């Protein structure tokens, strides 16, 4: 059995009942085959892959908090510090009932390569809780966040591990967590990113993941003889990534016709009204039914269905495994040119292969959605120098980073005989730097 297969088999055996983690490892290891084949003897002797798939540490803790009725609730908190070969652990905190250790490990593993691709000095980590923020009062959210930080503070720090937002964790949650960290530690430092602008946050961080997704998609289309302007775009999700993906797509001259949430989806042939979407989701924190009620041109449909709409570009910005083989077939049948992942691992392995086999340009999440964490790293830089940069300066840097990511993955794919396969390109480009740093730092 080859090295890749042996390591994958070991991962499945050692981490039972963690299908998302297996999936993320499989995708990465499969696409690293060309580089591993060339270096197999050295990597085997150094147990490089075995070290790469084993987190540095996994922290799991109890999060008790009191709800508005006076009832004590208990959730589970996680932080997986996966790899700090190239910088402090960096990655978001997901608050969602689906969170378990396998989900956090898949996200943390992806984060290693994503963060490396940004070319900034950040390692990979991820955390979160099975807490469901939906329907909770502000006071309940604060109670949870403070309790979460009462344990997490022991393991993080500006040069150690810097958490941020993810699904369910936005500016409000980061604010409560930052306040509690400061109170416990008595230290004012950039220990979290995605902070509010009045206390160390970076301009353009809110927009960064969605904007970055479009900068990379635009470059990918351009380099393959297409243009984003004039294209019809389908977006899934209605959270932070989706909202700013819609906004930037429209600024670049495309028409976005869909968004979705966990209950249903919108088809708006006139183009999504981003101001209304922001009002519904960011201000009122309501469902998409409120969007449909306020806009004549919008159709609301229950359940899933975004990928059945005819589009040139598909941007899955909701959650893992939301784009299945049937969705991929529908997209191809409708003539899709490009799929770029705004969420983490939204496309199943089977669907990804189908899209690649059918000549669809496919930008994997670890490249396409890296703009969020890249801008988090820019926030860390600003915190370290105790300065804040203008929106234009951050946005300009973000754009350059995304364009560079595209070219780095494009080059890596070409170097290893897989031209146009950006899954292979992104994984190899992300891996090269981490592998080099791990080997240089010895057995640790
Ligand atoms: N949660 C985001 C991601 O998946 C951002 C992480 C960060 O800014 O640290 O990359």
Image (cartoon, rainbow, N blue to C red):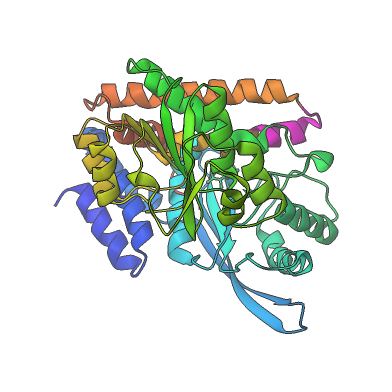
Query: Where 309 falls versus 414 (above or below)?
Result: below
Residue 69 among those drawn in magenta? no
Query: Where 247 falls versus 139 (above or below)?
Result: above
Residue 173 showing in the rendered view? yes
The quarter of the displayed image where residue 103 is located: bottom left
Q: Position of residue 375 (x, y in %)?
A: 62, 34
Query: Where 211 falls versus 60 (above or below)?
Result: above
Q: Position of residue 273 (x, y in %)?
A: 59, 37
Viewer-nearest residue: 49 or 420? 420
Ligand number 1: quarter of image: top right
Residue pictured at 64% horizontal, 64% vertical: 133
Query: Where 220 falls versus 112 (above or below)?
Result: above
Span highlighted in magenta in the image: 378-388
Provide the major secondary structure of the magenta segment. Answer: helix
Extreme-left residue of the structure: 1
Q: Position of residue 285 (x, y in %)?
A: 67, 56
Q: Position of residue 291 (x, y in %)?
A: 60, 49
Residue pictured at 40% horizontal, 18% vertical: 227
């Amino acid at each position: 059995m080859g090295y890749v297969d042996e390591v994958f088999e070991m991962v499945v055996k050692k981490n039972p009942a963690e299908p998302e983690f297996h999936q993320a490892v499989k995708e990465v290891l499969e696409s690293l085959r060309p580089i591993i084949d060339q270096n197999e003897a050295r990597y085997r002797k150094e147990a490089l892959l075995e070290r790469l798939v084993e987190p540095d540490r996994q922290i799991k803790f109890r999060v008790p908090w009191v709800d508005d009725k006076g009832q004590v609730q208990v959730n589970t908190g996680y932080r997986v510090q996966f790899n700090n070969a190239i910088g402090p652990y960096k990655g978001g905190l997901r608050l969602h009932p689906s969170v378990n250790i396998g989900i956090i490990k898949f996200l943390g593993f992806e984060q290693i390569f994503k963060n490396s691709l940004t070319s900034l000095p950040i390692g990979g980590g991820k955390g979160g809780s099975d807490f469901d923020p939906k329907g909770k009062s502000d006071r309940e959210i604060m109670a949870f966040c403070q309790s979460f930080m009462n344990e997490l503070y022991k393991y993080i720090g500006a040069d150690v591990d810097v958490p941020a937002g993810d699904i369910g964790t936005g500016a409000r949650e980061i604010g409560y967590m930052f306040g509690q960290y400061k109170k416990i530690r008595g230290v004012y430092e950039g220990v979290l990113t995605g902070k509010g602008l009045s206390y160390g946050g970076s301009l353009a961080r809110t927009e960064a993941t969605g904007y970055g997704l479009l900068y990379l998609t635009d470059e990918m289309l351009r380099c393959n003889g297409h243009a984003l302007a004039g294209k019809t775009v389908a977006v899934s999700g209605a959270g932070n990534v989706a909202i700013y993906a819609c906004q930037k797509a429209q600024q670049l001259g495309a028409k976005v016709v869909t968004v979705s949430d966990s209950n249903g989806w919108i088809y708006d042939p006139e183009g999504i009204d981003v101001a209304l979407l922001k009002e519904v989701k960011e201000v009122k924190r309501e469902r998409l039914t409120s969007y449909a009620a306020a806009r004549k041109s919008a159709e609301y449909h229950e359940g899933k269905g975004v990928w059945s709409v005819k589009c040139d570009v598909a941007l899955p910005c909701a959650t893992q495994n939301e784009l299945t083989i049937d969705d991929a077939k529908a997209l191809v049948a409708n003539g899709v040119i490009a799929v770029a992942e705004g969420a983490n691992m939204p496309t199943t392995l089977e669907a990804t292969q189908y899209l690649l086999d059918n000549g669809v340009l496919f930008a994997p999440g670890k490249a396409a959605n890296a703009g969020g964490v890249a801008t988090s790293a820019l926030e860390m830089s600003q915190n370290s120098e105790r300065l804040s940069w203008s929106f234009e300066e951050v946005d300009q840097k973000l754009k350059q980073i995304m364009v560079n990511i595209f070219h780095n993955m494009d080059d890596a794919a070409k170097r290893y005989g897989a031209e146009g396969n950006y899954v292979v390109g992104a994984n190899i480009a992300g891996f090269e730097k981490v592998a080099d740093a791990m080997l240089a730092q010895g057995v640790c």
